[in-house]
Amino acid sequence: ATYGFLNETPATYCKILFTNPSQELIDVGYSPELMLFYTDGTVAQPVWDVLLYSRLEKRAELSHVAQAFYQAHMTGDEDTKNAIHAQYQRDTCNALLRHLNHIIIEIEDLKVKMYSIKDASNHPRLPLLTRHHDMVIETFKNVRGYVTNMNN
């Protein structure tokens, strides 16, 4: 079989998962299929919104900021959303960089295990999985570069 989708994929899932997301987190955009990193290094807006809101809602002293962000999102007030994003950009970027570094290490470790398989004939999808992992690592590194530049 020939699999062409890897060369044509403009994005991959960001792999930020919440086991019990609040309804508000879902309302601001948490939906795994919308949480994307693009191969050019850019980040889908729901990732930024969800990551920021998830950090705000965990801190009682920032509940008023979380509520303001939530209301701005729900009413389409982009100016308020952008102002809150700007205020917490460093924190959000640092959290995203930690996630990116963690996933890159995890996938690189998986690739090492994959390369150690002696009899690849028992694993016909191994080349496809390897190419997929390469694409994910490259995308995550592109995103890491983009976010690092934003954070400076």
Image (cartoon, grey):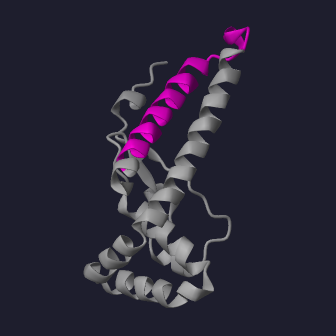
* Front residue of 150 and 51: 150
- Taking the magenta stretch, the answer to whether it contains residue 141 is yes
Q: Quadrant of residue 81?
A: bottom left
Q: Residue at x 71, y 15 (%)?
A: 116
Q: Which residues fall within the magenta stretch? A: 117-146
- Residue 123, horizontal then vertical, whole percent: 68, 17
Q: Farthest left residue? A: 79
Give the side of residue 95 with respect to residue 68, left or right. Answer: right
Give the side of residue 64 with respect to residue 115, left or right. Answer: left
Q: Is residue 141 above or below residue 126?
A: below
Q: Residue at x 36, y 54 (%)?
A: 152
* Front residue of 30 and 87: 87
Q: Quadrant of residue 63?
A: bottom right
Give the mark count.
Answer: 0
Q: Residue at x 47, y 70 (%)?
A: 52
Q: Quadrant of residue 111?
A: top right
- Residue 108, horizontal then vertical, whole percent: 60, 30
* Front residue of 91 and 120: 91
Q: Is residue 43 visible?
A: yes
Q: Residue at x 55, y 72 (%)?
A: 54
- Residue 137, horizontal then vertical, whole percent: 50, 34
* Front residue of 122 and 63: 63
Q: Main secondary structure of the magenta part?
A: helix
Q: Is residue 15 visible?
A: no
Give the side of residue 104 with respect to residue 140, left or right. Answer: right
Q: Farthest bottom residue? A: 64
- Residue 139, horizontal then vertical, whole percent: 42, 38
- Taking the magenta stretch, the answer to whether it contains residue 119 is yes
